[in-house]
Image: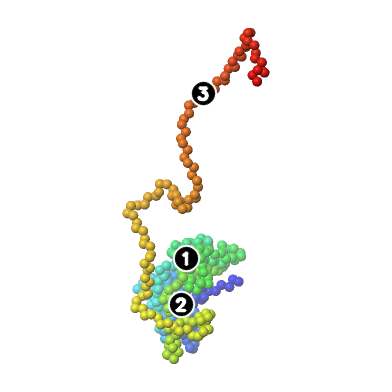
């Protein structure tokens, strides 16, 4: 846990070049020590020039040094006086013919080493470390990087116990080889002690192989195509289905393929329905909801239409018949006996 691999060394030879490019059969340790001393002297001498990296090439008995800097004018000097003086000092120490190439870093805000050194200079000037870190993160994001991570470790703000604090903006892939991650480290020597600054800057993925063509090894030699006339042309043989019952009867005989003079085409059938002709006038929406067709409607008995009822006069309240007085028989009349009628 916690064992982080170096971002530059992890991608060395894949999408990152070597900082020293030479080969030696004898005296390898001497040349390596010479490279380390050369880098240390140049870094200390050109501290104010904003040096990002120093690359060393040894073609033959010569020495070519490539310096990437954000302030090339300080190294070159007026009319090239400083660079000539630097070249003579290096030739006297190494006893070789020295060539110096200066490359300018156009966007120092996107160079991890320069960002680390700028934060270290601010910490030495007693600037608050959080303010310096936030300023570096904001400027890198403004210049278009996809992610930046800054980590400072040491006696921050003069505390008795050393600690680490970091800022991360964006997504930082650690194990993706094609990711273009720039890494830088610097130290700030303060009155309380040494504070280390590490910076990771993620600029995107390198998908084009032509950009790292010089880093790839030579392609393997391909095998020569041998004459296979004795084995026959396998391209004309049909595939045999060993799971079919016909495979057990005997070898299948391929039918001769018809000769085709042009691209294969299929004739359309004659009974295809033609598309309907669109009317010239625009189709208006229906005024009423669409009804189902007759064959979808349920059959039900429709009652005959009822005759229209005529308006009746208003009924008047019925008068109750008044009881009439019974007629009394006269004095001379005699009641008829009931037996005579029967």
Give the distance between the C-alpha atoms of the residues marked 3 and 1, in whole angstroms. Answer: 100 Å
Rendered image: mark on residue 37: none
Res 279 → quadrant: bottom left
Q: Earlier in the sequence, mark 1 or mark 2?
A: 2
User: In the rendered image, which residue does mark 2 sit on?
Assistant: 17
User: In the rendered image, which residue does mark 1 sit on?
Assistant: 146
Give the distance between the C-alpha atoms of the residues marked 2 and 3, in whole angstroms. Answer: 120 Å
Q: Which residue is nearer to you in this view: 151 or 326?
A: 326
Q: Residues within 10 Å of mark 2 (few under 14, many from 20)?
A: some
Q: Which residue is nearer to you in this view: 80 or 210?
A: 210
Q: Give the label, 3 or 1, closer to the camera.
A: 3
Q: At which x and y percent is residue 143?
A: 43, 64
User: In the rendered image, which residue does mark 3 sit on?
Assistant: 316
Residue pictured at 49% horizontal, 87% vertical: 27
**SS category of the residue bearing label 1:** loop
Give the distance between the C-alpha atoms of the residues marked 1 and 2, in whole angstroms. Answer: 22 Å
Q: At which x and y percent is residue 95?
A: 43, 84
Q: Quadrant of the N terminus?
A: bottom right
């Amino acid at each position: 846990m916690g064992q982080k691999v170096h971002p530059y060394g992890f991608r060395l030879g894949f999408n990152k070049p070597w900082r020293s490019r030479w080969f030696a059969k004898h005296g390898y340790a001497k040349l390596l020590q010479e490279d380390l001393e050369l880098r240390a002297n140049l870094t200390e001498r050109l501290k104010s020039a904003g040096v990002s990296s120093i690359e060393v090439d040894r073609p033959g008995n010569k020495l070519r040094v490539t310096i990437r800097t954000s302030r090339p004018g300080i190294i070159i000097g007026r009319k090239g006086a400083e660079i000539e003086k630097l070249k003579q000092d290096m030739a006297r120490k190494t006893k070789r013919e020295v060539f110096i190439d200066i490359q300018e870093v156009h966007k120092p805000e996107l160079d991890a080493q320069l960002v680390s050194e700028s934060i270290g200079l601010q910490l030495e000037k007693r600037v608050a470390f959080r303010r310096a870190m936030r300023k570096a993160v904001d400027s890198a994001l403004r210049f278009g990087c996809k992610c930046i991570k800054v980590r400072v470790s040491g006696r921050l703000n003069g505390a008795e116990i050393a600690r680490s604090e970091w800022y991360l903006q964006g997504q930082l892939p650690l194990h993706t080889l094609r990711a273009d991650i720039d890494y830088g480290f610097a130290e700030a020597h303060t009155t309380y002690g040494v504070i280390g600054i590490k910076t990771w800057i993620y600029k995107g993925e390198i998908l084009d192989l032509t950009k790292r063509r010089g880093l790839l090894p030579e392609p393997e030699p391909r095998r020569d195509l041998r004459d296979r006339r004795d084995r026959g042309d396998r391209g004309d043989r049909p595939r045999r289905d060993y799971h079919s019952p016909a495979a057990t009867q005997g070898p299948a005989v391929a039918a001769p393929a018809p000769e085709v003079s042009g691209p294969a085409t299929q004739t359309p059938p004659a009974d295809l329905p033609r598309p309907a002709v669109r009317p010239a006038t625009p189709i208006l929406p229906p005024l009423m909801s669409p009804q189902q067709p007759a064959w979808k409607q349920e059959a039900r008995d429709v009652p005959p239409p009822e005759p229209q009822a005529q308006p009746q006069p208003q009924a008047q309240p019925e008068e109750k018949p008044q009881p009439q007085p019974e007629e009394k028989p006269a004095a001379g009349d005699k009641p008829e006996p009931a037996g005579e009628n029967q």
